[in-house]
Amino acid sequence: MTDISKTFDVQINVVFPFLTKILKEKDSDRIKASGSFNYESVPQVETAQGRKVSLNFQKADSNAVRMEKMKSDLQGMIDDFNRIEKVLEQRSQHIEFKYDPEASQNESLTDAEETLFGTASGNISFEMYKKVLEYEERIDRYISHQSIENGGPFSGVA
Amino acid sequence: MALNLYEYDEDNNQYLQISEDGLHTNPIKTSHNGTNGETVEKKVYLKNEDANFYYTDIIVTSIPARKVKVGDINYPEAFISYKIINQDSQPTENQWLSIRSGNEVEMEDIGDASAGDTSYKPIWIQVGIPTGTRVQTIRDVSISLQAKSNPVGV
């Protein structure tokens, strides 16, 4: 009689809720996809369009009045640009990058998504992409911090 | 030692051997919604690979994650539950509720002195992730197996 002892591996992946949703609802699409951007249109809430500027001066207008009209128009344009930026940001949340995680040419992408988000779904949303950029920035800061702690130079200092 | 753990791959109609000792070449994988919390149940199988041996005193234990901050009740990872039940049919909710995370189960002997038994023995595992768990891959969990190996016919 011999005593035996073994330890079997378990891995728990904790993922974003929308990623889980995509995995459950779009699995067949995910397998078929081979790497393409997908834009899912959404009901248009606000028109992303700037105003038309027409400087309508009267002969009698003084320079000061004309300046005020130009300032007003310019402010309007700036407001429109800010509004357009917000609308574009909102719409960009519906852009996804789809790829086939089963395809060998996508191996590095599969590894990257699995490492960052716990599982390789084959769908990378714009939100996830922004998150990756944020992670990258944090990692850079961390490496820089560690370097300084270990006696390395400050960034930009010889 | 010829007792191994397997997972059934329905897509390819085959049993896949679970890796051991932290190698993680083929771990039992579960995927969870961390924001809302989610519980996942899976069926795995214990199998004797060598008909010349039989096994007694078999204890299977779920080893939960150890990376917890003691005393910090706001640390969701501290409440990840991990349970095991050995039976063929999927356990009921009440069955899962009646046992604690990190439990151990005693299995029936596999084979006896007259013959080895190489059939697959089902085990269910349940992994529960609490609400608010951050996105991550947890590998600090495992299934522990203790048993006594005996030669057949002796």
Image (cartoon, coloured by chain):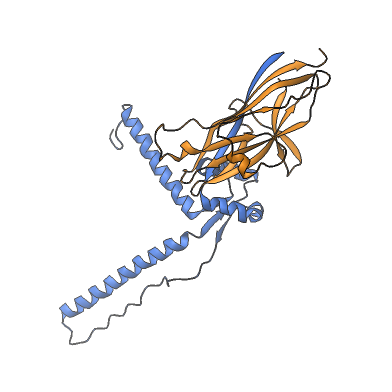
Chain colours: A blue, B orange
Residue B143 placed where, x, y %? 61, 29
Question: Could you tell me which residue is drawn at 34 percent across and 65 percent down?
Answer: A82
Q: Quadrant of residue A104?
A: top right
Q: Examine the rendered structure and indicate whether residue A106 appears above or below residue A44.
A: above
**Residue A147 or residue A2, whichever sits in front:** A2
Residue B130 placed where, x, y %? 50, 43
Q: Examine the rendered structure and indicate whether residue A11 appears above or below residue A52.
A: above
Q: Quadrant of the N terminus of chain B?
A: top right
* Number of numbered markers: 0
Question: Could you tell me which residue is drawn at 73 percent across and 21 percent down?
Answer: B55
Left or right: B95 in relation to A47: right
Residue A14 placed where, x, y %? 52, 43
**Is residue A98 among what the camera can see?**
no
**Residue A82 or residue B44, whichever sits in front:** B44
**Residue A60 or residue A143, whichever sits in front:** A143
Question: Could you tell me which residue is drawn at 75 percent across and 16 percent down?
Answer: B150
Left or right: A156 in relation to A63: right
Residue B21 placed where, x, y %? 60, 25
**Residue A58 or residue A47, whichever sits in front:** A47
Q: Examine the rendered structure and indicate whether residue A89 appears above or below residue A143.
A: below
Q: Quadrant of residue A158?
A: top left
